[in-house]
Image: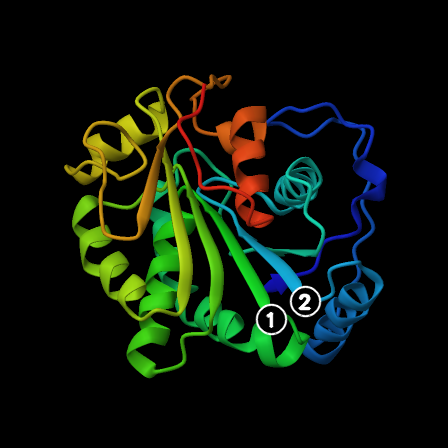
Amino acid sequence: KPLLFPGIGLYRFFVSSAAPPRNVQMGIALLDNAGFYQQIRDQLTATAHSDEVLVYIHGFCNGFPEEIWRAAKLSRDVGLLGTPILYDWPSWDEKLEYVADLRQMEDSVESLADFLAEIPAKTGASQIDIIAHSMGNYGLLSALDRLRLQGRLPRINHIMMAAPDVTQNLATQKIPPLLATGKISGMTLYASDKDFAMTISRHYNKESPVGGLPPVTLFPHLVTVDASEVGDEGFGHDYFVSSRAVEQDIGYILQNQALPRKLS
C-alpha cells in the first residue's frame, strides 16, 4: 500500500550512492487512509509548490527501508520542490525470487491503479510526476492501462521509466495507447547497454527488455535516453540514483526546463 516517507531533512548529509548508509534512522507511523492523505495535504500546504507530487515505484528485490532512503535521496538530488511519495509494493527482497516478485507486482496492479486515480482528488495536487524503476514499470504500465480502459486515467505531467524491466511486446501494447489519450504530457525512458539486470531479464523472459540496449525503443511522444556512459557500481542497474547526470536530467524534466538529452 502507499506510504508517505519522512521529510528529507535527516538525509541531507548523505553522499550520493545507490546504497543507503548503515547509520540511517527513520521514524515510521502507521496511518489509516484518511490520515495518510491528510499528511500529504499538510506537506503540500507547507511547500513552495503546493500542487506537485512525485510518486516513486520501486523495482525487484527492494526492501521498504532501502526504498524509503532512495526516494528521499532522489527527491533531494533532483531538486524536487513538491511532495515525494513512495509506493511500496510487497517485494520479497531476495535476489533469487524474481518469479515471486513478479507475481506480487501483478497482484498489486489493482491497488496501484486505485491509488494513482485517487491522488488528484484526495491530495489536491494538480501536477503529478511518476518515476518507476525496473520491475516497478511493469506494474505502472499495467495499472495505467487498466485506468485507461476504465476511463479513470488521471492527468499526469511526466512519467520517467528508469531501467524498465518491461518486454518490448508489453511496451508496444501499453505505451502508445496511453500516450494517445493526451492525458500524459511526457514520457522518458532511460536505458543502458551496461545494465546486467537487463541481461538477466532478457535471458529469463526470452525477449529484450526496453531498459536494455540494443534495441532502442521508439514510439511517438516517447523520449528514450541512452544512459550507457554514465557508469554505475554493481549491476549497472541503479544509475537513476547513483549518476549525477541522470539525476540532473530528471530534475530538468520536473522543472519543465528542458527536454532530456544524451547523457555522458
Q: What residue sits 68% from the left and 67% below the top?
A: 51
Helix, strand or loop for disc 1: loop
Distance (Cα) linking label 1 and label 2: 5 Å
Residue kind at label 2, given as amino acid type: Asp
The x and y percentages for residue 185 are 42, 60
According to the image, label 1 marks what residue?
126
Would residue 133 be seen by someone viewing this image from the given angle? yes
In the shown orientation, is residue 88 left or right of residue 95? right
Q: What residue sits 34% from the left and 19% below the top?
A: 194
Front one among 219 and 10 = 219
According to the image, label 2 marks what residue?
51
Front one among 7 and 33 = 7
Q: What residue sits 47% from the left and 37% below the top?
A: 94
Helix, strand or loop for disc 2: loop
Front one among 112 and 168 = 168
Q: Decide: few, some or many residues near mark 1? Use Cα within 10 Å; few <14, some 14-19, many ≥20.
A: some
- Give the position of the N terminus as an image quadrant: bottom right
In the shown orientation, is residue 99 left or right of residue 53? left
Residue kind at label 1, given as amino acid type: Ser
Front one among 154 and 98 = 154
Q: Decide: few, some or many residues near mark 2? Use Cα within 10 Å; few <14, some 14-19, many ≥20.
A: some
* Lower position in the chain sequence, tag 1 or tag 2: 2
Would residue 87 be seen by someone viewing this image from the given angle? no
Dot label at residue 97: none
The x and y percentages for residue 156 are 48, 65
Q: What residue sits 22% from the left and 49% below the top?
A: 219
In the shown orientation, is residue 238 left or right of residue 148? right
Do the residues under discs 1 and 2 have CB atoms within 8 angstroms? yes
